[in-house]
Amino acid sequence: MKVFGMNTPEYVQSKRVKAAIYYREYGADSWWQWECSGAH
């Protein structure tokens, strides 16, 4: 599980990059993410 917790532009960009890597490496159903900043 990956927990994301900020909503700054830089962090959102980093989150997108990490998510793309996780989707590619593990598949859409093989990893979980939680957005705890309230931004979806």
Image: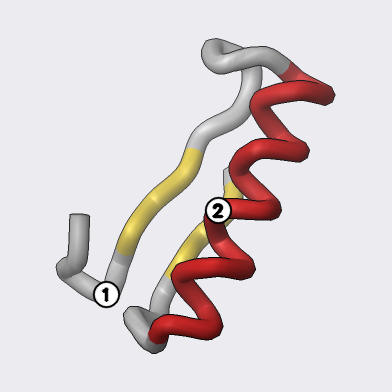
Q: Could you tell me which residue is drawn at 67 percent across and 14 percent down?
A: 27
Q: Colour mode?
A: secondary structure
Query: Which residue is most to the right?
Result: 25
Q: Could you tell me which residue is drawn at 65 percent across and 38 percent down?
A: 20
Above or below, comparing residue 1 to residue 28 in the picture: below
Res. 22 image quadrant: top right
User: For this view, does 16 lie left or right of residue 7?
Assistant: right
Res. 37 image quadrant: bottom left
Location of residue 14 in the rendering, given as x and y in whole percent from the top left corner: 62, 68
Q: For the C terminus, give its image quadrant.
A: bottom left
Q: Which mark is residue 9?
A: none
Secondary structure beneath label 1: loop
Location of residue 39 in the rendering, given as x and y in whole percent from the top left corner: 19, 66
The three-letter amino acid code for the residue at tag 1 is: Ser
User: For this view, does 35 lie left or right of residue 23?
Assistant: left
Secondary structure beneath label 2: helix
Dot placed on the residue nearer the N-terminal end, 1 or 2: 2
Q: Which residue is disc 2 drawn over?
A: 16
Observer-nearest of 8 and 31: 8
**Distance from Cα at disc 1 to Cα at disc 2:** 15 Å
Q: Could you tell me which residue is drawn at 39 percent across and 51 percent down?
A: 34
Above or below, comparing residue 14 to residue 34 in the picture: below
Q: Which residue is disc 1 drawn over?
A: 37
Q: For the N terminus, give its image quadrant.
A: top right
Location of residue 36 in the rendering, given as x and y in whole percent from the top left corner: 30, 67
Res. 6 image quadrant: bottom left
Above or below, comparing residue 4 to residue 8 in the picture: above
**Mark 1 or 2: the one toward you:** 2
Asked if the residue at tag 2 contacts the one at tag 1, i.e. Cβ–Cβ closer than 8 Å, the answer is no
Q: Could you tell me which residue is drawn at 68 percent across and 52 percent down?
A: 18
The three-letter amino acid code for the residue at tag 2 is: Arg
